Amino acid sequence: MDIIVDKPQLVRVMLLYLNMNFGDLTPKSYLNIPDKVFYVDKQGGTVLEYEEDNGFEPTVWVDTKLLWSRIENAFHLNYNDIQSILKVWLKETYNFEEISVSQASLGLDFDFDFD
């Protein structure tokens, strides 16, 4: 059975999915990396990395395995659509504005001592 969903409906479903699964990430900073904030899930996996001063606009790096590919596989969206929806979600949920959003392999966890 095929279900037809228009773009506004898809965005609402994705935002709900993101909030339910990733809306409670904990920001962590590392003393030796002062210009980055890592957003960690309850299992200690780094899902997002916020880099404010990278010579360009602030960037949120989204872990490929923990988040990006899950969206790609579940919702069958292309890179630009995922990027656009994540920008909306990051603004609404984590108050990020005027950011670039990209995917990266951030690793499952860090052996760092966060402050």
Image (tube, helix red, strand yellow):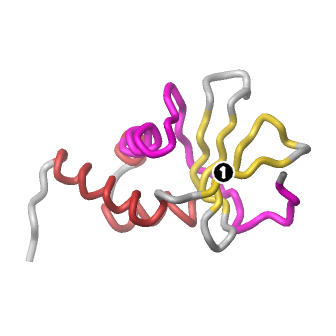
Q: Is residue 22 above or below residue 96?
A: below
Q: Quadrant of the N terminus?
A: bottom left
For image coordinates 40% across by 40% down, the residue present is 92
Determine if the magenta segment contains residue 112.
Answer: yes
Residue at the farthest bottom position: 1
Toward which corner of the image does residue 60 lie, by quadrant? top right
**Eyeballing the image, is 10 above or below 102?**
below
Marks counted in the figure total 1
Q: Residue at x 39, y 64 (%)?
A: 20
What is the crowding at mark 1: few (fewer than 14 residues within 10 Å), some, or many (at least 20)? some
**Which quarter of the figure has residue 52?**
top right
Task: Answer with left or right where residue 28 lies relative to residue 9.
Answer: right
Image vertical order of residue 74 relative to residue 7, above or below = below
Residue type beneath disc 1: Pro
Question: Closest to the observer: 51 or 24?
Answer: 24
Give the residue at the far right of this rendering.
32
Q: Nearer the viewer, residue 9 or 20?
A: 20
Q: Looking at the picture, how far across and down is residue 57, in whole percent?
A: 61, 24
- From the viewer's perspective, is 85 left or right of 10? right
**Which residues lie in the magenta part?**
85-114
Residue drawn at (49%, 29%) of the image:
97
Which residue matches tag 1?
27
Kind of element beneath mark 1: strand
Residue shown at 57% from the left, 51% from the top: 62
Q: Give the side of residue 55 with respect to residue 91, left or right.
A: right
Question: Residue 90, position in %: x, y?
Answer: 47, 42
Residue 107 belongs to magenta span: yes
